[in-house]
C-alpha cells in the first residue's frame, strides 16, 4: 500500500506544476527539478509528460517529457529527483516508457519513429533501436517481449531486443496483455467494426 500512496503523491506533485504559468518559484523543491528536467524552459504549460513507470523493487519512478532527451529518476520514498539517464533521442517526440518488473530494465518507445530502445537505468546504457509497431508487453517468466505488428503478426523478442519468434495469422493485433498467473496472452483486436 505504501508504494501506491507514494505513486499517488508523486503524480499529484508532478501534475500540479504544469497547469500554472509562473508558479514554479512557489512550489516545493521536489517539483523544481522535475519541471526543469521536463521542459528546459520557464513555461510549465508547454510540456507533455509521458507515462510514469515505477519499479517497486528499486523504489524508483521514471518519466520522460516531450522537450527533453533525458529520462528522469525519482526516489519514491523521498519524492526527490535523484538522477537522469540520457536517452540520446532529441526533438519534440513522444517517448513512452515500459518497465520489465523482473529485471528493472526500461524500454522506451518513440511513437513518431516506431523505434524501441532498451535502457538500463542503473548503468545508463542505451541500446541501438529496433523498429516495432507498439510498446511491448512482458512475459517476466521467460523474459520475452511481445509486440503487435499489424496487420497480422505478433513478434517476440528477448529482453536484449533480439528476435526470438513470432505468431502469425492474428487479425489486426492491437494492445497485448500478459497474465502471468494464468499463462495467457490477450490480444485486443484493433480492426474497425
Image: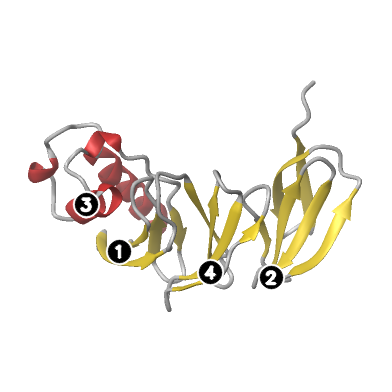
**Residue 13, image x, y percentages:** 26, 45
Please report whichever mark, 2 or 4, sits nearer to the chain's N-terminal start: 4
Q: Is residue 42 above or below residue 142?
A: above
Q: Assess whether mark 1 and mark 4 are in contact (beta carbons under 8 angstroms).
A: no
Task: Give yes or no for contact between labels 2 and 4 (Cβ–Cβ under 8 Å).
Answer: no
Numbered label attached to residue 105: 4
Give the residue at the far bottom of this rendering. Answer: 123
Any part of residue 166 in sight? yes
First in sequence: mark 4 vs mark 3 = 3
Q: Do tag 2 and tag 3 residues touch (Cβ < 8 Å)?
A: no
Secondary structure type for disc 3: helix
Q: Which residue position holds label 2?
A: 143
Picture quadrant where residue 29 is located: bottom left
Vertical order, 11 against 181 (above or below): above
Q: Nearer the viewer, mark 4 or mark 3?
A: 3
Numbered label attached to residue 7: none
Q: Quadrant of residue 127?
A: bottom right
Q: Nearer the viewer, mark 2 or mark 3?
A: 3
Q: Which residue is mark 3?
A: 36
Q: Is 10 above or below relative to 43?
A: below
| Mark 2–mark 1 CB contact (< 8 Å) | no
Mark identifier at residue 77: 1
SS for dot 1: loop
Quadrant including the N terminus: bottom left
Label 4 neighbour load within 10 Å: few <14, some 14-19, many 20+: some
Which of the two labelled residues, at mark 2 and mark 1, occupies the earlier sequence position? 1
Amino acid at each position: 500500500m505504501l508504494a501506491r500512496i507514494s505513486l499517488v503523491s508523486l503524480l499529484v506533485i508532478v501534475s500540479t506544476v504544469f497547469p500554472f504559468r509562473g508558479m514554479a518559484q512557489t512550489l516545493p523543491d521536489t517539483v523544481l527539478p522535475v519541471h526543469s528536467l521536463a521542459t528546459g524552459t520557464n513555461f510549465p504549460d508547454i510540456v507533455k509528460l509521458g507515462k510514469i513507470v515505477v519499479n517497486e523493487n528499486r523504489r524508483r519512478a521514471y518519466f520522460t517529457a516531450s522537450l527533453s532527451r533525458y529520462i528522469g529518476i525519482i526516489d519514491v520514498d523521498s519524492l526527490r529527483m535523484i538522477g537522469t539517464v540520457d536517452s540520446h533521442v532529441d526533438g519534440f517526440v513522444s517517448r513512452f516508457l515500459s518497465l520489465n518488473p523482473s529485471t528493472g530494465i526500461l524500454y522506451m518507445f518513440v511513437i513518431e519513429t516506431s523505434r524501441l530502445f532498451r535502457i538500463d537505468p542503473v548503468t545508463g546504457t542505451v541500446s541501438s533501436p529496433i523498429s516495432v509497431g507498439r510498446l511491448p508487453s512482458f512475459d517476466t517468466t521467460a523474459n520475452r517481449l511481445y509486440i503487435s505488428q499489424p496487420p497480422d503478426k505478433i513478434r517476440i523478442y528477448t529482453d536484449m531486443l533480439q528476435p526470438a519468434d513470432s505468431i502469425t495469422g492474428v487479425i489486426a493485433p492491437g494492445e497485448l496483455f500478459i497474465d502471468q498467473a494464468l499463462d495467457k496472452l490477450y490480444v485486443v483486436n484493433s480492426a474497425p467494426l
